[in-house]
Every structure is written in structure tokens, then in C-alpha cells.
Image (tube, rainbow, N blue to C red):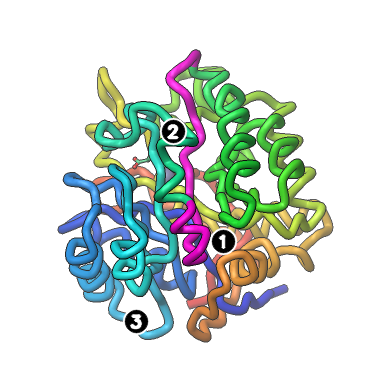
């Protein structure tokens, strides 16, 4: 059995830079027609020049006409209307990181104050530039996303024309909030869709499933699964694939981030198939994102077949999600 997907999109991706970029980017480019690339490099991407130069490095690393990087700007300071007009041709969204919540987010916003953000967010609304948010507080690790919900609500209510993307949602509370405001949207990762905290710390410690937001309870996972399997048009796929070298993960102070890029579409095909919902996969991995962002990605047909394979233990110096495990779908190259 095989299935084809038209121009799949990964709407949340970390590609890194230099050698890591050149090793990981081809895995995404072979499976996707485009990806929204996160700006949390060191230093973060805060200028048009840096973003345009990074896009060129990504294009060199992928080397395909049927893959388009959709770039983002790291929000650090007030952005004037004029500055956003200049930036608009180079970006698909502005990314807001609360400071300190994840990898390379130290220079993010120390506090999220709706009135302080008003000039930037009104200009973005007018220019139709979406705001992508890592929605976590600095509170107790299992509650950080839940505690951020009032901030999503305040922003959605204050800027009703602004598209706000709740990135990598991991909790049942996020699903409830998503449905309260028409201008809230969400990405879901394959790891928050399939795993629970037991897959991180339930047995021997699994550093390669450690990420932010932390993977949560069975009830949270089930709420995310129900929403995705309902064909929810405001939910799109974003892998949050975030490679770190093996020694940075298997360490006394391990980095947060899961390298899922090599396995995401096979895992999604298996998941939708097991639930008898393969017909909804195209919407989740492409159509919803095209509608939400108003983008038309390059033509890129991807074929998957139902055939078992074993995920490599290591790719370059990174351990991928499901390393050494069997997956029932594989990419036809
Ligand atoms: O686990 C994560 N890793 N979550 C993020 O939000 C960032 C990412 C990274 O860049 O490593
Ligand atoms: Zn991310």
C-alpha cells in the first residue's frame, strides 16, 4: 500500500547552521515542500540581512527547487510599521520567545505586556504578518504552558486581526484555548502527538525525547490526538525537529530538543492509518497551513509506502527520534 501527499509542510523547524545545517536540512527537504524555519540561532535572527543570508545558506544545504524555507524574525524589540514593511518580503512570521524558556531564548522578551507590544502587534496586524509564540512561562515545568494561556487570550482579544500561532502545543488546556478565539492557531509535533512523560522519564532516562515544552500526561496527549484526528482546520503540523549533538543530549546538563526530521512523515502516516483517518493527513501536513498562512508552496509530491524499516541509531552526530526502532511506513525515494 502507498499514499501520496501534495506539498507537505513542516511549519516549525530548527535547521541550525554550518555543518549541522548541511547534515540535517536534506532530511526535511526530501519530505517537505517547505518549512517554517526558527530564528533561534546564536546570535538570533533579528535583521533582514541576517535572515536573507541564512535563507541562502539553507538553499545551498538543501539544493532543491521543490523545497522552500519560510523564514522568521526573532522578536527582541519594538518593530515599527516601516521596519515591518521592509521585513515583510523576507519573512512569513515573527517569533516571540519569552526569555529563558528554551534553547537560545535568553534574549527573548523578559515580560509579555500587551500594551508594550501594541505598536508592534498593531503594525503586524495591518501588514498581515502572523505572530508565532513559544507559549511557556518560567513556572513549574509541567504547568508552564497552562500558565501561559491567559497571555494567549489577552493577545488574541487585544489584536483580533492578528494571526497568533500557539507553537508545539502539549496540553489539553491549549486545545481549549485554541477554540476560544478565531485568530488563534496551533502547530502540533509528532512527539507531543505520540508520546507521554513516561517516554521521557518513566523508565530509564531518555534524553533524546527531552524537549521544551516537556511531553506531558496521557490526558494531554489524548486531547491533542482527538483534535488532530477531528481534522481541526486551525491545527497544522510543525515538527519542532531540533537537533543537538549526541554529547550535548547525553550529558549532565542535557539540551532540550528532539531530532525528528528523518521520521516525521512515516510516523504520521502510521498514526493516521492506525486511527483509520489517512484521509485527514493531507490537511494536517499541508492544506491547513496553506490556508492559515496564505502560502502556495512549490509542487512536491511525496510518496510513502507501508513497509517496515529500522531508524538508524545515529545520523551525523545526532540521535534521531525512534532510533533503532521499527516504523511501519517509509518514504519512497
Ligand atoms: O526542545 C526544544 N528545543 N524546544 C524549543 O522550543 C527549542 C528547541 C531548540 O532550539 O533546541
Ligand atoms: Zn521550536
Disc 1 under 8 Å from ligand 2? The reply is no
Pointer 2 or 1: first along the chain = 2
Separation of residues labelled 2 and 3 (CA atoms): 30 Å
Element carrying mark 2 = loop
Q: Nearer the viewer, residue 165 or 1?
A: 165
Disc 2 under 8 Å from ligand 1? The reply is yes
Task: Write down the residue under mark 1.
Answer: 265
The picture places residue 267, in percent across and down from the top left corner, at 60, 54
Pointer 2 or 3: first along the chain = 3
In the rendered image, residue 18 lying in the magenta stretch gets the answer no
Q: Which residues are magenta?
A: 122-140
The picture places residue 176, in percent across and down from the top left corner, at 75, 36
Can you say whether 99 is above or below 33 in the image?
above
Separation of residues labelled 2 and 1 (CA atoms): 19 Å
Q: Are marks 2 and 1 in contact (CB under 8 Å)?
A: no
Q: Quadrant of ligand 1?
A: top left
Task: Write down the residue under mark 3.
Answer: 64
Residue 310 visible in the picture? no
Amino acid at each position: 500500500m502507498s499514499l501520496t501527499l501534495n506539498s507537505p509542510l513542516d511549519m516549525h523547524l530548527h535547521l541550525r547552521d554550518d555543518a549541522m545545517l548541511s547534515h540535517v536540512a536534506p532530511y526535511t527537504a526530501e519530505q517537505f515542500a517547505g518549512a517554517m524555519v526558527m530564528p533561534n540561532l546564536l546570535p538570533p535572527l533579528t535583521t533582514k540581512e541576517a535572515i536573507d543570508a541564512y535563507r541562502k545558506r539553507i538553499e545551498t544545504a538543501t539544493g532543491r527547487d521543490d523545497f522552500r524555507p519560510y523564514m522568521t524574525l526573532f522578536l527582541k524589540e519594538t518593530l515599527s510599521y516601516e521596519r515591518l514593511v521592509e521585513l515583510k518580503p523576507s519573512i512569513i512570521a515573527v517569533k516571540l520567545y519569552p526569555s529563558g524558556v528554551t534553547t537560545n531564548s535568553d534574549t527573548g522578551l523578559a515580560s509579555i505586556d500587551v500594551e508594550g507590544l501594541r505598536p508592534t502587534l498593531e503594525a503586524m496586524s495591518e501588514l498581515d504578518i502572523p505572530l508565532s509564540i513559544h507559549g511557556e512561562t518560567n513556572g513549574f515545568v509541567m504547568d508552564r504552558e497552562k500558565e501561559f494561556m491567559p497571555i494567549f487570550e489577552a493577545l488574541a482579544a487585544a489584536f483580533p486581526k492578528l494571526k497568533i500561532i500557539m507553537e508545539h502545543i502539549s496540553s489539553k488546556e491549549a486545545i481549549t484555548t485554541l477554540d476560544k478565539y478565531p485568530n488563534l492557531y496551533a502547530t502540533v509535533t509528532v512527539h507531543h502527538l505520540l508520546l507521554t512523560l513516561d517516554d521521557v522519564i518513566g523508565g530509564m532516562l531518555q534524553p533524546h525525547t527531552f524537549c521544551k515544552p516537556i511531553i506531558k500526561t496521557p490526558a494531554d496527549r489524548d486531547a491533542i490526538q482527538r483534535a488532530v484526528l477531528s481534522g481541526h482546520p486551525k491545527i497544522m503540523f510543525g515538527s519542532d525537529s531540533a537537533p543537538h549533538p549526541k554529547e550535548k543530549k547525553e550529558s549532565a546538563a542535557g539540551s532540550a530538543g528532539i531530532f525528528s526530521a528523518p521520521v516525521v512523515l512515516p510516523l504520521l502516516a502510521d498514526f493516521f492509518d492506525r486511527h483509520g483517518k489517512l484521509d485527514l493527513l493531507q490537511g494536517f501536513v499541508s492544506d491547513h497551513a496553506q490556508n492559515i498562512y496564505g502560502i502556495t508552496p512549490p509542487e512536491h509530491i511525496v510518496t510513502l509506502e507501508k513497509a517496515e524499516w529500522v531508524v538508524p541509531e545515529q545520523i551525523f552526530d545526532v540521535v534521531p527520534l525512534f532510533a533503532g526502532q521499527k516504523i511501519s511506513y517509509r518514504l519512497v525515494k
